[in-house]
Image (cartoon, rainbow, N blue to C red):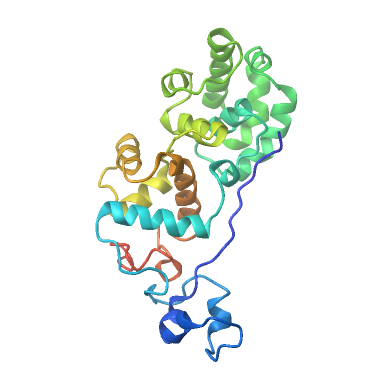
């Protein structure tokens, strides 16, 4: 199986360009006299404090469910791909994905991707990792931080896979969360990215965007997951989670979010309030 990386292409049209000439929406051929048609056909991010207009969406969603569906629709264009394609953690199978996801706590995907090639080469199977010398594992994963606790989780997880599941990574939520070091967030990553099953992983980015968009008022990740899952199709949950993460890293950052660049700003209750 080939390694999987995050991909993000596609841009939304500038609302400033779209609102400046309604005749753009009526253009039907390259020979149209509309001076903005070339820009309409080359979508790009919002500029300034401009809002998206009817060129992009007819009406602004007012209910949480409506905002969730519109968020899903727009982000699927901005960050296209399946959950597997959007995942930035490099892996070749579900075991590697599980290891990488455990390592990703409190660090960046890039840092994890720097250490996993050597780790996977040294311990290619759960049985190999279960029998590993903890000191050697700590040395390999040291750059990811919290290396002692992560080593304990990795070795415990690997031993549990060997003892309970014949060395295979289970896919049920109950069996995954029974593994050492695996909570609902990690389990949802395995289900959605590793198997294409419904799973909405909630990290700090997902929780922050969900609250700013008025999709939930909760800070508890499990409750945020419950609220968001009820608003979007099961098949879209994994990809939505990763798209929210990508948007949270690039635009809707924790401090001083870039609302002037955000394609959700026209209906986001928190836009330009920071």
Image location of residue 207, percent across then percent down: 36, 46
Q: In this view of the protein, which residue sits in the foreground, 41 or 186?
A: 41
| Left or right of residue 33: residue 268 | left
Q: Which of 261 and 58 is in front in this view?
A: 58
| Residue extending farthest bottom | 33
- Residue placed at 49% from the left, 33% from the top? 197
Residue 218 seen anywhere in this rendered image of the structure: yes
Which image quadrant is residue 147 in? top right
* Numbered marks: total: 0
Where residue 155 sits: x, y (%)? 58, 17
The residue depicted at 33 percent of the width and 65 percent of the height is: 271
Q: Which quadrant of the structure image shows residue 150?
A: top right
Point 46% across, 82% down: residue = 26
Q: Is residue 133 above or below residue 58?
A: above
> Residue 6 location, x and y as percent?
60, 48
Q: In which quarter of the image is the N terminus?
A: top right
Residue 36 % position (x, y):
53, 85
Q: In this view, does 54 lie above or below 258?
A: below
Whether residue 213 is visible, yes or no, is no
Q: Is residue 134 left or right of residue 190?
A: right
């Amino acid at each position: 199986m080939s390694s999987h990386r995050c991909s993000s292409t596609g841009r939304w049209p500038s609302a400033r360009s779209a609102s400046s000439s309604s005749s753009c929406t009526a253009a039907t051929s390259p020979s149209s006299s509309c001076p903005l048609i070339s820009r309409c056909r080359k979508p790009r991010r919002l500029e300034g404090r401009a809002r998206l207009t009817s060129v992009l969406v007819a009406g602004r969603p007012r209910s949480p469910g409506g905002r969730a569906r519109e968020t899903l629709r727009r982000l699927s264009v901005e960050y296209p791909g399946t959950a597997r394609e959007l995942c930035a953690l490099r892996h070749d199978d579900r075991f590697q994905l599980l290891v990488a996801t455990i390592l990703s706590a409190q660090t960046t995907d890039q840092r994890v991707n720097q250490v996993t090639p050597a780790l996977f080469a040294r311990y290619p199977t759960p049985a190999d990792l279960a029998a590993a010398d903890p000191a050697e594992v700590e040395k390999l994963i040291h750059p990811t931080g919290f290396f002692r606790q992560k080593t304990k989780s990795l070795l415990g997880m690997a031993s549990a896979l060997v003892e309970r599941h014949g060395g295979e990574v289970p896919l049920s939520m109950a069996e995954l969360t029974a593994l050492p070091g695996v909570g609902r967030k990690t389990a949802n990553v395995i289900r959605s990215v590793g198997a294409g099953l419904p799973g909405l992983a909630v990290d700090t980015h997902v929780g922050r965007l969900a609250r700013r968009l008025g999709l939930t008022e909760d800070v508890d990740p499990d409750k945020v997951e419950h609220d968001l899952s009820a608003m979007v199709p099961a098949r879209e949950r994994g990809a939505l989670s990763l798209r929210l993460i990508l948007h949270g890293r690039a635009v809707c950052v924790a401090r001083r979010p870039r609302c002037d660049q955000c394609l959700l700003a026209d209906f986001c209750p928190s836009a330009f309030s920071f």
